[in-house]
Image (cartoon, rainbow, N blue to C red):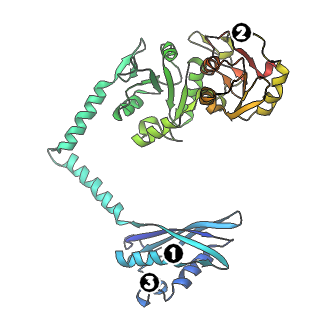
């Protein structure tokens, strides 16, 4: 490819071929099928010899008997000539013996990076090299807003946890890792976040989680995963959200935060993803592991014999699915565990039993009781503090 200081634009296109082709085939098709098409002034071979276009770069790979990839062509032509050359690529309809399709994706002005460099340098000059800095009205507004948001951060509870101003009065809260995460959410108008400060979860957060709808929102790294596992052990969560892989909550922009929170998963699904080791025995702040604090299942009425449910338990093993069953153990509906709560709420049929490959949580139990479900069978039992007497709770191992 020619030197970047002479390149003005880069043409980028996608290519698919109905067969297996390689880079030389694509390059040959580009030269061959555009030859004479645009006249002598825009002949690719002549333009490349004179350095007005650079080396044609092709990345293509086979998949399922076909080929797909990209074509990149650097150009030092003017805008009009570059546009004509870019448009000509879509006229190519064969590569070697194969039918092919080329779609122009974009034409990049590489001088934009130089403009960015100029802007960054100018910002440095304005902020560090002038004796005084004069802010524009919009900048002044943003600075004031930023200061107000920082002032809005509060401290909650005896552990003085960093929190947004709406944590106390809001019906829902978002648990994050640190103060910087709370500030980031405040910056985008989210005022019900509270920080726990790491994997050592403060005791004061536990009763708060029992009163609110709780979403744990952590970094997309190993530390964030450990915090989720710890919270699942000691606190009552409703949803789990994660930042994109490798990113921290404090590094996200508004669009990424909104997307992550919209994609939050119910705790029943999260318990499958972050399932603790069966041998884990722990005690944190007076709260033992979930299996230690379970209410003993009680049988009320005359539910169906367990052996009618065993085939469903076997079918659902390691599927992360759930089945809603009628009084004859026929399947009313089969859904993913993450959708179990909403499916239970919306189901209009009479549900006798629910069998699912996930943890029985207080949330699922409460919904099951509202729908007059007689029997609830999960892979394991979660932290149950209130057991409706009309629902029989069992685990797969107890059948």
Residue that carries the numbered disc 3 in the rendered image: 47
**Mark number displayed over residue 296:** 2
Q: Position of residue 268 (x, y in %)?
A: 63, 27
**Res. 314 image quadrant:** top right
Residue 223 visible from this viewpoint? no
Q: Position of residue 181 (x, y in %)?
A: 42, 31
Kindly identify the residue that appears in the image at 79 percent across and 21 percent down. Answer: 397
Q: Residues within 10 Å of mark 1 (few under 14, many from 20)?
A: some
Disc 2/disc 3 C-alpha distance (Å): 81 Å
Disc 1/disc 2 C-alpha distance (Å): 69 Å
Nearer-N-terminus badge (1/2) = 1
- Left or right for 221, reference 290: left
Residue that carries the numbered disc 1 in the rendered image: 90
Say which of marks 3 and 1 sits in front.
Answer: 1
Kindly identify the residue that appears in the image at 83 percent across and 23 percent down. Answer: 308
Q: Residues within 10 Å of mark 2 (few under 14, many from 20)?
A: few
Nearer-N-terminus badge (3/1) = 3
**Viewer-closest of 70 and 397:** 397
**Res. 392 image quadrant:** top right
Q: Position of residue 134 (x, y in %)?
A: 15, 44
Q: Are marks 2 and 3 in contact (CB under 8 Å)?
A: no
**Extreme-front residue of the structure:** 349
The count of marks equals 3
Q: Is residue 62 above or below residue 218?
A: below
- Secondary element under disc 3, as helix, strand or loop, is helix
């Amino acid at each position: 490819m020619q030197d970047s200081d002479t390149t003005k634009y880069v043409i980028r296109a996608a290519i698919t071929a109905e067969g297996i082709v390689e880079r030389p085939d694509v390059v040959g098709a580009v030269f061959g099928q555009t030859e004479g098409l645009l006249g002598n002034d825009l002949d690719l071979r002549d333009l490349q010899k004179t350095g007005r276009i650079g080396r044609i770069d092709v990345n293509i790979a086979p998949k399922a008997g076909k080929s797909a990839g990209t074509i990149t062509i650097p150009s030092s032509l003017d805008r009009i000539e570059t546009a004509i050359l870019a448009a000509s690529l879509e006229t190519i309809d064969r590569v070697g013996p194969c039918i092919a399709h080329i779609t122009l994706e974009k034409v990049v002005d590489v001088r934009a990076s130089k403009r960015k460099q100029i802007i960054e340098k100018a910002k440095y000059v304005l902020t560090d090299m002038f004796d005084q800095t004069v802010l524009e009205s919009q900048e002044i507004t943003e600075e004031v807003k930023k200061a107000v948001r920082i002032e809005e951060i509060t401290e909650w509870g005896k552990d003085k946890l960093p929190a947004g101003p709406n944590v106390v009065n809001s019906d829902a809260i978002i648990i994050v890792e640190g103060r910087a995460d709370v500030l980031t959410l405040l910056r985008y108008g989210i005022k019900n976040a509270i920080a726990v400060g790491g994997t050592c979860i403060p005791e004061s957060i536990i009763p708060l989680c029992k009163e609110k709808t709780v979403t744990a929102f952590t970094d997309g790294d190993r530390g964030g995963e450990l915090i989720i596992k710890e919270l699942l052990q000691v606190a009552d969560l409703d949803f789990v959200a994660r930042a994109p892989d490798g990113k921290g909550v404090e590094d996200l922009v508004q669009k990424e935060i909104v997307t992550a929170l919209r994609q939050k998963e119910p705790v029943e699904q999260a318990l499958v993803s972050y399932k603790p080791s069966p041998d884990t025995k722990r005690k944190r702040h007076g709260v033992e592991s979930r299996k230690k604090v379970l209410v003993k299942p009680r049988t009320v009425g005359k539910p169906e014999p367990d052996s009618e449910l065993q085939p469903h338990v076997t079918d659902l093993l390691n599927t992360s699915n759930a089945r809603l069953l009628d009084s004859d153990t026929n399947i009313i509906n089969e859904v993913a565990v993450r959708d179990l709560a909403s499916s239970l709420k919306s189901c209009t049929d009479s549900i006798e039993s629910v069998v699912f490959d996930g943890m029985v949580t207080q949330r699922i139990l409460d919904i099951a009781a509202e729908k007059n479900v007689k029997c609830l069978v999960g892979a394991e039992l979660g932290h149950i503090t209130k057991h409706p007497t009309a629902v029989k709770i069992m685990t797969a191992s107890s059948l």
